[in-house]
Amino acid sequence: MTTDHGYPAVRMHIAGQWCQGGTGRTAPVVNPATEETIGEVPLATAADLDRALEAADTGFRTWRDTPVADRTALLHTAADLLTERAEAVGLTMTLEQGKPLAEAAGEARRVADTLRWHADDARRAYGRVIPSAPGTLLTVRREPIGPVAAFVPWNFPAGGPMRKISAALAAGCSLVLKASEETPATAAALVACFVDAGLPAGVLNLVFGDPAEVSAHLIASPVVRLVAFTGSVPVGKLLAAEAGAVMKPALMELGGHAPVVVCADADPVRAARGAARAKFVNAGQVCTSPSRFLVHSSLVDEFTDAFVAAAEAVVVGDGLAADTTMGPLANERRLRAQERLTADAVARGAKLRTGGERLDRPGYFYPPTVLTDVPADAALMSEEPFGPLAPIVPFTDLDEALRIANALPYGLAAYGFTDSAATAELLAARLEAGILSLNHCGGSVHEAPSGGVKDSGYGREGGPEALDAYLITKRVSHLLTP
Ligand code: NAD
């Protein structure tokens, strides 16, 4: 069923049933390209959450005891369904989040592949046999940790949920997933693929609600054995503290403020084009988005000209229009943040090279914006913009660039451009980040781990490491000849 806007009706999924919340309370879903309300998202009551927890508890035992070959086969079926539905899921995503349709459908197809990758990795959750005394079998086993409470944001409406769902289900865990109330229908469309593939009731539960109420309720429940969160640093710290208070492990994928270091021997035009492409993906609302451009002073003019040209070539518009290459910000909060950060930088002496003012039309549109001469005390240099702002700052020696790059409490992604293998190795060794790309601005891939250091969080998603958080390690020594 869809609304007049072509947006699906959204429901929660609890204990194998699609449902509204107990009190019928809802919140509006807004299309960021038009500011129109396009749907309603149901909000869970405490009783709804308790039903989801009970279902996850039962579902866990069912799923844990399902042979791994059957689990893998079912996850592949869900991935195939998502691939078939990618265009429709992409349309839903564009309506509720704003990103261009091609980017949205591409995200749906990519996460189907993420699911396949983790499904196959489920078969390789090996333990080990350790040489021991005669008559003793000493083994290390890996077992699913139990029901997971997962919280995901709105910037990747398919990618965020699927990273948690695919790793948890591959490991043999059940979930209560609270997806974003701002992008609920994409999450529901993913869950529908698992339901239609035959996932047993209770294994994957989807809820929405007041984020603080839902997280406090789920984290405190003795049913939940792992807290998995993607979002901002302040909320991550809050949830990690709540998890710590009840001695639960947590997986924290938080924000960053990625430096791009362009060294004196790099090609400034190639670096600018690559960095600009990465900067404006998803309107800059990506945790690994390049966001501080540190350029050797000998290259800064050439780099800036090429970057500004690339920024001005971006076509900003409704994600449904065929020629759009960058959609609106996903919500009004992000629009206000871009306005505030730009005004603050300019007031402190930064020069606006392009952009800098919201578009004069309905929707949360803010253009690619390039600022030079940005002083160190501008908020933009320490606060993650999570939007299409690019401050360019010159440096004269590499130690200075590394000092600026590592000065913030964040440590998620970093980028470097250089023609020297030795300098590349130096950057690899010295940049404080969990994800480093050299001579390109690479995005996340499911076959390799992503995650942060310092305030950007802990734990890894992607790669074989993705299952670590969802598995416990059990030592079993078995005396065979008592
Ligand atoms: P926010 O801090 O209000 O919320 C971030 C996410 O956490 C949202 O999805 C929100 O629903 C959820 N959330 C908030 N309070 C929560 C709680 N008590 N329990 C559980 N979930 C809770 O910020 P926002 O305005 O939605 O997003 C802006 C900031 O969030 C950005 O500046 C960026 O730093 C960060 N962010 C990071 C990522 C990421 O991929 N790491 C994704 C989205 C947003």
Image: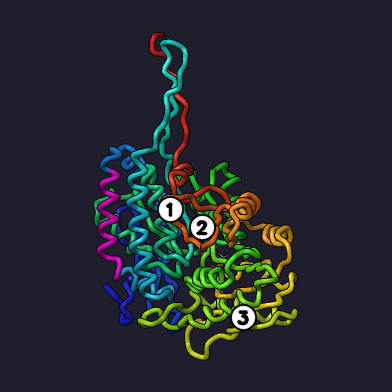
Q: Verify whether residue 76 appears in magenta.
A: yes
Q: Earlier in the sequence, mark 2 or mark 1?
A: 1
Which residue matches tag 1? 164
Q: Is residue 131 above or below residue 88?
A: above
Residue at the image point whose x is 59% and y is 45% from the top: 244
The residue to which callout 2 is attached is 230
Q: Which quadrant of the figure has residue 337?
A: bottom right
Residue 73's disc is none
Residue 56, position as x, y percentages in the image? 38, 47
Q: Which residue was labeled with disc 3?
A: 339
Tell me which segment is drawn in magenta. 71-87
- In front: 457, or 390? 390
* Quarter of the rendered image showing ligand 1: bottom right
Q: Secondary structure at mark 3?
A: helix
Kind of residue at disc 3: Glu
Which mark is first along the chain, 2 or 3?
Answer: 2
Q: Secondary structure at mark 1?
A: helix
Callout 2: few (<14), some (14-19), or many (20+) C-alpha neighbours within 10 Å? many
Q: Secondary structure at mark 2?
A: strand
